Image (cartoon, rainbow, N blue to C red):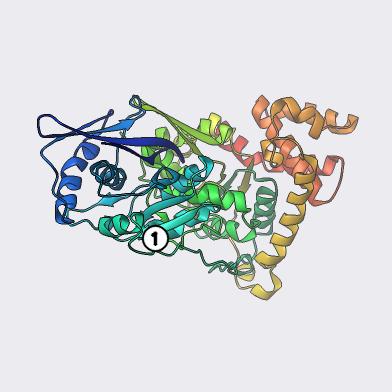
């Protein structure tokens, strides 16, 4: 007898349909599996054989062949166990279900038939919906995250025996219904807690309003890390589309079950400076997302930027431009989204106190060597470079109630991003920082005075084409913050101020 069951394999954050075919025929007793299988899939043969026996079914002395197609796609992971078991039992006649071809089945099976959770349940359920399936059968631990796909029935099961009884109509299993209800966003921090540093807070608001990358430079304890950790509190809420896409990233990494399924808040990731390029970008023999993808839609904060390996920082250059990570392996290419707001912080010298010569004893050569750990090509990917000076006593002890709260700043940010949304309606551009070079003249047009000013700045600061465009994009955001249709000279001057520090770094 012959049977076929639909399942899926995760590639990047999307899924590819896989058909598990089982054939039971006369011949030498054998349980064979084919279809370009990884070692863990090959091991499924023994798990499935033992689980079926412990369920009370005796495999006949026949030739059992299981094929996972398409055969040119490598299969890895333990999510095929349940589909293989169901396919074999259906071929043996132990499962009599006419609707089995309308379902997607996935899960890991233990030797006693219990089901264990798998990675990537959300993109699998989303793929099943796209394929026109009516339901998904998954381990009960994955039911909550799979239900986020919407538009498809999700059945969470605890054992292979329960799956068999359900498919045979011997046991009723209720469809998983996700609890709805929007939670209030709760952050443990707020911008009102930062005293002084008005210029730094203004730069943070500009950065978030236009989704511009920002680098903060200053001595230890000036408030750089405090400001970075509060950036998510002034970002606008995630859209439903963004929530689903971010949740898929965490799902394929097996991290979604640690959360309350749906990712409803913008991510904030702050990896330690000892992280490798692979950990930051993603990869491995069987690729997984890295920190830059975990921060998709939110903030990636690199504290102590100069302590990172230079080669590690440099791998970010291409993803920061393309907003996506492409990882190529022998078995195929994996794509992960990486649309982030990059925030970084660094000291002005090795000891951290330059230019205060009362505290700093670093020589010019030491300072130059320290600052050159950050390359000019990487600085070109930074839109805003701002100094965070040491606070005096009066600034430090100023009453926090006089400071603006994150909620107040976020209201302005939402208004500015709404202006950008209307401007870029009908295009693939999401915000000012994403304006492509060929559209600069259209969206960042300058008057005669502004043109003359930028011509002078271009020569004086020896700008690159990329840094010149960055200034115009930041100026466009500043103009939007003042609800100005035109980019004025004052907007350009402020944007140029945000490029002053990175020029000092490179010129030393």
Position of residue 326 relative to residue 173, above or below, is above
SS of the residue under disc 1 = helix
Q: In screen coordinates, is 354 left or right of 480?
A: left
Residue at the spot of label 1: 258
Percent coordinates x, y for residue 431 in the rendering: 70, 42
Q: Is residue 14 visible?
A: yes
Q: Nearer the viewer, residue 338 or 368?
A: 338
Q: Is residue 344 visible?
A: no
Percent coordinates x, y for residue 181 in the rendering: 58, 68
Mark 1 nearby-residue class (10 Å; few <14, some 14–19, many ≥20) = few
Q: How many marks?
A: 1
Q: Quadrant of residue 479?
A: top right
Q: In screen coordinates, is 188 left or right of 111?
A: right
Q: Nearer the viewer, residue 374 or 316?
A: 316
Q: Residue at x 53, y 35 (%)?
A: 324
Q: Residue at x 70, y 55 (%)?
A: 202
Q: Residue at x 75, y 45 (%)?
A: 421
């Amino acid at each position: 007898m012959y049977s076929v069951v639909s399942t899926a394999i995760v590639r990047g954050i999307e899924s590819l349909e896989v058909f598990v075919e089982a054939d039971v025929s006369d011949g030498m007793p054998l349980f064979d599996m084919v279809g370009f299988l990884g070692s863990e899939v090959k091991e499924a043969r023994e798990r499935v054989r033992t689980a079926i026996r412990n369920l009370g079914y005796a495999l006949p002395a026949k030739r059992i062949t299981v094929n996972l197609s398409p055969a040119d796609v490598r299969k890895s992971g333990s999510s095929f166990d349940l589909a293989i078991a169901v396919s074999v039992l259906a071929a043996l006649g132990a499962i009599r279900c006419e609707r089995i071809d309308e379902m997607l089945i996935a899960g890991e099976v233990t030797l006693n038939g219990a089901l264990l959770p798998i990675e990537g349940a959300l993109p699998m359920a989303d793929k099943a919906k796209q394929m026109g399936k009516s339901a998904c059968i998954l381990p009960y631990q994955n039911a909550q995250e799979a239900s986020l796909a919407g538009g498809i029935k999700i059945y969470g099961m605890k054992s292979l025996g329960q799956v068999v009884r359900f498919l045979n109509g011997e046991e009723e299993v209720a469809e998983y219904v996700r609890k709805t209800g929007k939670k209030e966003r709760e952050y443990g921090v707020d911008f009102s807690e930062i005293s002084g540093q008005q210029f730094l807070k203004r730069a943070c608001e500009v950065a978030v309003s236009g989704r511009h990358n920002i680098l903060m430079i200053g001595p230890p304890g000036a408030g750089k890390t405090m400001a970075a950790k509060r950036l998510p509190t002034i970002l606008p809420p995630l859209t439903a589309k963004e929530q689903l896409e971010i949740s898929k990233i965490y799902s394929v990494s097996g991290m979604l079950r640690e959360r309350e399924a749906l990712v409803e808040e913008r991510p904030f990731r702050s990896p330690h400076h000892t992280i490798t390029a692979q950990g930051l970008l993603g990869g491995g023999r069987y690729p997984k997302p890295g920190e830059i993808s975990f921060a998709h839609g939110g903030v990636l904060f690199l504290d102590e930027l100069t302590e990172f390996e230079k080669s590690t920082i440099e791998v970010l250059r291409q993803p920061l431009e393309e907003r996506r990570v492409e990882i190529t392996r022998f078995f195929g290419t994996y794509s992960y989204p990486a649309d982030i707001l990059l925030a970084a912080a660094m000291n002005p010298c090795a000891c951290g106190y330059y230019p205060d010569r009362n505290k700093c004893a670093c020589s010019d050569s030491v300072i130059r060597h320290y600052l050159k750990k950050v390359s000019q090509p990487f600085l070109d990917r930074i839109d805003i470079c701002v100094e965070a000076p040491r606070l005096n006593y009066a600034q430090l002890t100023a009453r926090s109630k006089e400071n603006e709260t994150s909620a107040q700043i976020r209201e302005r940010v939402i208004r500015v991003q709404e202006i950008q949304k209307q401007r870029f309606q009908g295009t693939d551009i999401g915000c000012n920082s994403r304006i492509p070079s060929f559209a600069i003249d259209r969206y960042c047009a300058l008057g005669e005075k502004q043109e003359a000013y930028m011509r002078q700045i271009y020569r004086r600061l020896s700008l690159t084409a990329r840094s010149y465009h960055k200034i115009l994009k930041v100026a466009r955001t500043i103009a939007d913050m003042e609800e100005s249709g035109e980019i004025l000279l004052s907007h350009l001057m402020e944007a140029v101020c945000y490029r002053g520090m990175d020029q000092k770094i490179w010129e030393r």
